[in-house]
Amino acid sequence: NELRKLSGEKRIYEKLRQKGYFPPYADELVKEINETNFSVNCAKLIKKKYGNLQSEKKESDRIVAEMIRNGYTLSQVKNAIEILNKKK
């Protein structure tokens, strides 16, 4: 369900822990879905929420912070922004 919501792997891990999965099992489940390209999912989420990226630093920082709160790593967010900039 979290993958359909375009959540990052950290958020997925936390949701599994909240549902009562022990850390080794939660780690194993996250590893299984790790084949998912989270950078592409992050790019989809940014496109969905913001449309075209703005080049303003303040706006860019806000997007990065929100994506990190959604469970994406900084490198995944940077890759997602690169993907979106290539599509321009």
Image (spheres, rainbow, N blue to C red):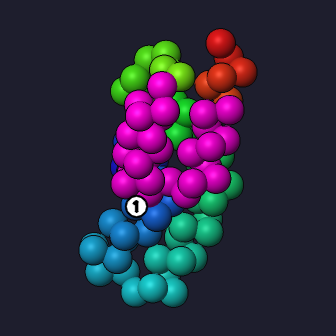
- Residue, far top: 88
Residue found at x 51% / y 87% = 24
Q: Dominant secondary structure of the magenta stretch?
A: helix
Q: Is residue 5 above or below residue 30?
A: above
Asked whether residue 87 is drawn in magenta, I would say no
Camera-side residue of 84 and 26: 84
**As drawn, is 86 to the left or to the right of 81?**
right
Query: Residue 83: percent from the left, percent from the top?
Result: 67, 30
> Mark 1: which amino acid?
Arg
Asked whether residue 72 is drawn in magenta, I would say yes
Q: Which portion, as a residue range, is magenta?
A: 56-82
Q: Mark yes or no: residue 84 visible.
A: yes
Query: Residue 2: percent from the left, percent from the top?
Result: 39, 51
Q: Mark yes or no: residue 7 visible.
A: no
The mark total stands at: 1
- Residue, far right: 86
Residue found at x 61% / y 65% = 32
Q: Residues within 10 Å of mark 1 (few under 14, many from 20)?
A: some
**As drawn, is 55 to the left or to the right of 13?**
right
Query: What SS does tag 1 mark?
Result: helix
Q: Is the C terminus in the top left, top right, bottom left or bottom right quadrant?
A: top right
Residue found at x 38% / y 40% = 62
Read off the residue under disc 1.
11
